[in-house]
Amino acid sequence: MFSNCLNKIGKACLLAVMLGSVHGCREILEPPPVDLLVDELVLTGPADIEPVRLGLYNALRSFGSTTIMAGDFTADYIQHNGTFTDYNELGNKNLTAANGAVAALWGGIYGAVYIANFIEENIGQVSKVTQDEKDVLLAEARFCRGYAYFIAAYTFGDVPLVTTTDVQTNRNIPRTSKEDILAFVLEDYEAALADLPDLWDANSREVNKQFATRNAVRAALARYYLYGKDWINAEKYATELINTGRQSLDSSYVTVITTEFDSETIFEVAYGNTSGDDPGTSSTGLNNLLVGRREVIPSNNFVLQLLTNNAGTRTATIRFNSSNQQGNDNGWTVTKYGTPDQSNNNITLFRLAETYLIRAEARAQQGKITGTGGALADVNVLRIRAKAPLANFSTQANALTVIEQERLYELAFEGHRWFDLRRTERVQAVMSAFSPNWSSKFELWPVPQGEIQRNPALQGSQNPGY
Amino acid sequence: MTKYGALAGLLLIILGLNAPVRAQNRNITGSITLAKDGSALPGVSVLVKGTAIGTITNLEGQYTIAVPGGTHVLVYSFIGLETQEITVGGGRSVVNVLMEESQTELAQVVVTGYHQLQRRDVIGSITSLKSDKFKDLPVTGFDQALQGQAAGVQVSQSSGTPGGGIAIRIRGNTSISASNRPLFIVDGTPVFDGRVSGRDFGGQNDNSLAVVNPNDIESVEVLKDASAKAIYGSRGANGVVIITTKRGKNNKTTITADVQRGIVELIGKPKLMNSTELVELQREAALAGGSNPDMMGLIAGVTDLVDTDWISEVLRRGILQQYQVAAAGGNEKTRFYLSGNVRDEEGVQLNNRFTRYTGSLNLDHAANTKLKFGANINVSMTQNDRVKGDNFLDGVYSGAIKSLPYYSPYDEQGRLYVPNDPNYAEFPNFNPVGQALLPRFRTYGLKMIAGANVDIELARDIKLRTKVSMDYNNSEEDQYEPSTTAIGGYLASVGGKGYGVYLTSTLYTLVNSNVLTYYKAFGEGHQLNLLLGNEIIHSQERSSDVSGRLFPSDQFTYISSAGVVDAGGSFYSQSGLMSYFGEAKYDFNEKYYLSGTARFDGSSRFGRSRRYGFFPSVSAGWRLSQEPFLESLAFLDDLKLRGSYGFTGNERIGNFQYLGTWASVTYNGNTGVSPNRLPNNQLQWERTREANLGVDAAFWDGRVKVTADVYHNLTDNLLFAEPIPLTTGYSSIQGNIGQVANKGIELSIATENLTGDLKWTTDLNVTHNQNLVRLLANGDTLYRGYTADGVGSTNAVLEGQPLGTFWGLQFLGVDPATGDALYEDLNGDGKISPDDGQVIGNAQPKLYGGLTNRFSWNGIDLSVFFHFMYGNKVLNLTNATLLNAGTDLENNQSKAALRRWRQEGDVTDVPRYELGNTYNNYHSSRFLEDGSFLRLKNVALGYTLPEAWVRKVGLQRARIFVSGNNIWTLKRYSGVDPEVSTLDGSTVSQGIDFFTLPQVKTIQGGFTLSF
């Protein structure tokens, strides 16, 4: 057949009077791609390490905002104020399996898992790169994968455990029990802790906070054990982290809100500020949802709590504008996610204040309430920074109540509330009081409708109630 | 290899057949002229009947033919002229002939693919439309003019936006993901159709076909079956529309001036609540939802003191004007057509305007009888002042339709309310009057279609045509949204100080085609036509964009003054097609026809293993009316049966879809790579197998003409991105899995009812098409369209249903006891969930067509044209907002909400209103309506002044006319216009009305003068 184009043209000289002069055949039929990289070339040599690494963090970032939706929008912090059905469902506690945020979180998690698996499968074959460099990239991949599965397990319950890039395998894959997923997370975290550096660049705070470090793994492990009610390990990793001294609390809470890469951040997923790399007006961009469109505004209940004395300067989490107050709109806006101009559109995954609260809770659960090494001291570190009255408690029950409230003041809209209420088993009480539509099925997000339809192994295994 | 060998062999056979016949001859000479104006006719074929002896006339219309002794019959024929047979006795040596233009349609020229045929000899399914059929229609582009004029051609205008999108489907929809638009060919050049510009305006796009001036068009041919289309191979599956522009004739120069002016207004307005009705409804909804309406500022007698009719505030009566001067003429050697045209249409929305300037020049020159040249240049420039709409909250009509009537566009000083004013309605409502008047959304368009061809007669009966042509489309979008608009002033991420965008986009196709034709008549009535050709098509796409924000003030509107320029991009891609094609046609005595066509295409869009495709077709025709057993039927003029079978393709997907690729992504402003697409080396063409049976008949001296076709087409290897579970790390894989079938019946009847002084003709065409998705990968259901509350998506593609299927819950009415919506619990699990989603209807009509009656009497002509569609459903998605059962209180409501359930026992179809309740507004068949309509599309009344009068003032011809478009519509749809489609050009999500601007009504008048 036509194996050679030029040959064909030569023989067709009578027909192709002008053909040769216009364009060559290869040019016509095989134009090179200009903005795409074919699979085989992605991870082969030393120059490929950095682009793939950035792709990994980009994938991790891609579900930053939806994780916050799971943690905060599912809970009692918000009301809906816009036109998007996805957020109407979240605001009015009518979440369905067709919700776009649900699919976006699920897709984001498995997008990150894919790149991590790709790195794990291919890192061995990269030429001219030292074993140490390979180990570090793999550690970053495993940290990201562990974090992705951690969010998956606590949002959806049992989820498919994808450990390869093979499409055929991953198209037809059943759910794995939450316990096994969490065991996999722990393996990833521990492997990452061994190989990640303490610092990437001694001179750049920005670099050390936008990429995973050993302290990021410690923060993740502290949270892992807190959720798993392993109070000793939770305290242990929190203390290890605090004792490294690599992070310190900002002197003012407003800095937490308005500044990127501030001194207490352990790890934040980052957007650029002077380039097109910003969350922009995408339908899951937090600034767009909370400030631009005000699709989602703080609930009255939340506003009232943040206006109490104990919240202190943390009321800066929200702001009031009387011109917004009309109809069902209470006029309040969440301010934690700014625009590119305000340079605070990054999403913080771990910061030191949470570590203090983890340790406070772990200590309280072990009965360490007051004194050095007690929960009260950790809570008051944050109260002092917030210029709020010092907390005072002496019983375990009181301590846990105050800590729950302190997490609300301190960590609101950073993706914690719904996960916290569930692990403390307070979710039914708090949420039923908040919304008549609440039902226990909302203790897990549904598996996205599309996944059930497209993955035969998932058919009939939707979470209860959806 | 084998293939080319065969072609070469065929060439040898052709040359071999060309051995001249010699005998004891005498010469006959003569000249041939056109009876009408006495001009010489070059190129007329002169043939000694029953022999292979023939010649053609030279440039001066003269011929010399050597004939054997004795009496012979000479046959003089020329396409478009009546064939004459003259018996020449032994002694005669000079035969001069006057030839008449043919009156019968059977002899008219039909342009098919790479050559021309007489209608009589067409055995494919081809509909021809001459320019006089659409000369009085106020159409912007010829695509609009096809509506209701041709059987098998479904044309829907997506909205009333001037210069906006038109959906054309020929014999149904064949594809899910690849384009469903036909291939458009203008003077042999494949032209780009669809949008050129880059920015989304909410749903409605610009239309590059609106840039071609329909007044320059001589005829439009629609190729519908495999026999006609297979010569276009991989691009033919959706039908081919061939446009031939006007060319000069061999006679004296004629200058024609056309003037048209008219007014444009919306065909109707939606019925919306006034302030008092709305405040009452909102109070009710707030109370039901546990809120205090007083605290929300909803106070009857106070809040409703302002009552704005937003729709009227953003609409106007537009002015439409068009001016054209054309000159045509020529002599034996050179002919020309030259025209200039200006068209200016004000849209009905404030500040919306489409202006077009076109110029065209067509030249034909004959150096001698063996060498001819031709050239065509068609240049159009447009300026399109656009406004946002449809799915955009900051649109004009789309904003007005939902704006709360208790806000006002202007303050007490008559100044527009803008963002951050105290009484501005705020998100999600913006001031639609401001959104119309304040931004600048100007698109400059440029389209050039140009070509040059050389025709060489290589030997007697063998001609070579070489053509190089191009289609160049460019758009530049010059946009500024000041701080007084939603984007420029309200959106936090933009910064509240204006937003400027500048985009350029160029789409460019270069084509070279070389076609050899061979014609031979031999023996008694045998005629053979052969065609061989190749074609190279190279397309480029180039674009760039930049945006800036933070302007010092709204007096600075270009990006040079922007404080921050932080977004921009550029892009380039190219694609190519390399093809060989051939055709063989044979007929015997114009009674038996046989033809075969094939094209062999190589496309850059597919991987090496699947790069080439072969698309053959065969067809046959039988003119029964020539048979002795039917010759006794005096009333029967012509009866022809046709049949064809063949394959065509569709390659219109994006580039590089077969490669597994990673694309660039960013993290903290640095660039990395991220997986983009899964590879599929086996990706290939969509292939449509087409079978067609047709009959053409003419009765009673051509007073009744009937054409009927039945067809059955099956498209397989359907190109689409098969959705796969996200656990793979991807959302889809490009594949070729699926089948879509179209079968249908087309009927066209043309009658001359009265032929005396008062003439009356009727044209009717009706089409029934049945579209069905036969097969999908894994039996999957693909969800498409808009996301839908509580059920996933508004549209679905699934086996056993047509494309354009609507998906949703089945609405069973409103529970009279509670006022809640009742939905069918399809799976019987006791709750309503997305699993209860089902097919609720589809957007494709069962029947569509057009009916035109034309009358003429003493220079007065009247035409009345109806267009209709029957059996299609329209999704009134606007009502998911305007009849929203209290989901939110941010939008005005339709008057239909006055029917809402209010107390126990109310029997109604509108659920109760409760603030924040989304359940009652789940996407369901509640929003699906019958979209059938009958529309008086056009009435035109003209008067041609008596020739005696106009001669006195030096004119040849003068005609005045008035015409009205979209005068009246019979419909059941509760919205304004069932024809609209918010997702302009979409196949799987067609027929959705989502704040879409309805069609416009146009009343215009004008005159035509010829010198």
Image (spheres, rainbow, N blue to C red):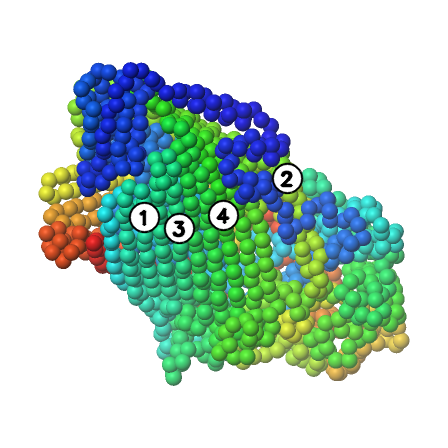
Q: CA distance from mark 4 to mark 3?
A: 15 Å
In this rendering, the count of numbered labels is 4
Residue B497 in sight: yes
Of the pair B385 and B19, the residue shown nearer to us: B19
B557 left or right of A397? left
Co-location on one chain, circles 4 and 3: yes
Q: Chain of mark 3?
A: B
Co-location on one chain, circles 4 and 2: yes
- Dot 3 or dot 2: first in sequence order is 3
Query: According to the image, label 2 marks what residue?
Result: B680
Q: CA distance from mark 1 to mark 2?
A: 51 Å
How many C-alpha atoms fall within 10 Å of the one at disc 4: few (<14), some, or many (≥20)? Answer: many
- Dot 1 or dot 2: first in sequence order is 1
Quadrant in the picture for the C terminus of chain B: bottom left
How many C-alpha atoms fall within 10 Å of the one at disc 1: few (<14), some, or many (≥20)? Answer: many
Q: Nearer the viewer, mark 3 or mark 1?
A: 1
From what the image shows, is residue A369 above or below residue A138? below
Q: CA distance from mark 3 to mark 1?
A: 11 Å
Co-location on one chain, circles 3 and 1: yes
Q: Position of residue A117 (x, y in %)?
A: 76, 48
How many C-alpha atoms fall within 10 Å of the one at disc 2: few (<14), some, or many (≥20)? Answer: some
What element does badge 2 sit on? loop
Residue A413 in sight: no
